[in-house]
Image: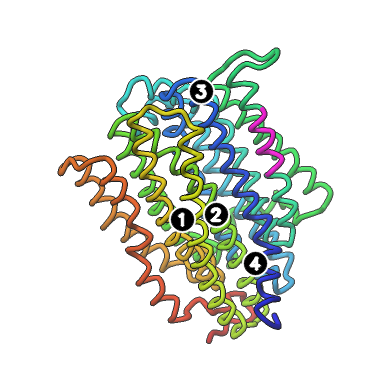
Amino acid sequence: MKNKKDLYKVLFSVVTPIAFQYLMSSLVSASDAFMLAFLTQDALSASSLAGQVAFVFSLFYGAFVFGCNVMAAQYWGKGDAETTEEVLAITMRYALLVGLIFTLATAIIPEKIMWIFTKNEVLIAYGANYLRVVSLSFVLTGFSQVFYGIMKVCDRAKLSSLIGSLAVVVNIILNAVLIFGIGIFPEMGIAGAALATVLSRVFECICVLVVVLRKMCPPLRIKLMLQFKNNEIHRDYWRYTLPLLINQLGWGGGVTMYSVIMGHLGNDATAANSIANIVRSMIASLCWGIAAGVGIILGGMLGRGELEQAKKAGGSFVRFSIWIGIGSGLVILALTPLVLHVIDLQPGAEHYLKYMMFFAAYYIIGNSLNSTIISGIFPAGGDTKFGMICDVITLWVVVVPLGLLAAFVWKLPVLVVAAILTLDEFVKIPAVYIHYMKYKWVKNITKETEEKV
């Protein structure tokens, strides 16, 4: 990269389609919430809680894809397509295995799964119905998400964004048709939202297969996927993926505990929390896209041996992420009156939502900085362990215990509990920045050239 202008030009060429895909995906949750709110608040709350199962699954396939990107970005940047295909096969193997487990669990014991999140019998019944219908989507999602990841690495980010966005449009249209029973279709309510998800996953898997068959992205080598050979690439894959998986499960488990805590504080708290999370996720799409783009760009630079340039680029990305976080927070504040006007909630839930939107506005500033560094910069050079340690300690030693004490021991007001549960991003900023300045992430992890500055 000759200068910062060129650097940001490349960044946005990668980030724009990725961020748009994240945004479109978050629109599915938004459309579910908006449409189900027209039925009952119970349906809205139940779908939000049942959706936590999909969130937990995303932690697994997210770690597998992150691990794939850590290695594939450097090998692809180096021009080694054969090793990139091997990494793809390894990633697909584990994504499909875990997807099958989630599919079977939600199809067979949905009531027991819902019981984890709430003791409300009405919400359990609604949620179990949703999970039973949506169960097939997990294994389908595992397949499509792995290919989305490899497309981004291999300069096909726009293609993955197009497929993902079309699938979202299909999902939203089917939501309306199946939830409300438009035309010849029966009114299915919350089960319609679940069926729409499954059908949209079928659509995107078909599109992915077409892309693969037309050789527009690296192919999936079935023999490599089925071959459990513990070779050097396989060991390297788990070397970088295991810390990411522990990090994902530690972080995601903590976030899921937030929903569990709020789910036990009443229907109003659950509904308000679900809406605030959806809005925050939509606005955070750009932050997550930047983190993904940063990882791909820096990974390619490091794989080519451009270590000093990558170090300087990392500093530019860190500063940029802070401004993006501030801008995102202001957007959330600006959207708050519109959200309160559009979403029909009970007075208690509406009161909670107004303040939870403010919490989301300042939370996203820390999230933008941390996601860029922990999920983008560090993994680009194979530094995946620090994020694991940092997130697990922050959530499980500090924030989750404080939240549990505040909610169930000290019996503090709902909004105080919600505020406590947004502290994690700011608690870890000092440790994250100190580790960043050590530059352990400035490293080429490909086998032929292992050098470090």
Work out whether residue 254 or residue 60 is closer to the camera in this orientation and state it: 254
Q: Which residue is mark 2?
A: 64
Can you tell which quarter of the image residue 74 is in? bottom right
Q: Which residue is mark 4?
A: 73
* Pointer 1 residue: 245
- The three-letter amino acid code for the residue at tag 4 is Ala
For residue 377, the mark is none
Q: Amino acid at mark 1?
A: Leu
Instruction: Give the quarter of the figure containing the N terminus.
Output: bottom right
Q: Residue at the location (59% across, 58% down)?
A: 289
Gap in Å between the C-alphas at discs 1 and 3? 38 Å
Which sits earlier in the primary sequence, circle 2 or circle 3?
A: 3
Indicate the amino acid at tag 2: Phe
Q: Nearer the viewer, mark 4 or mark 3?
A: 3
Give the Cα distance between marks 2 and 4. Answer: 14 Å
Q: Secondary structure at mark 1?
A: helix
Nearer-N-terminus badge (4/3): 3
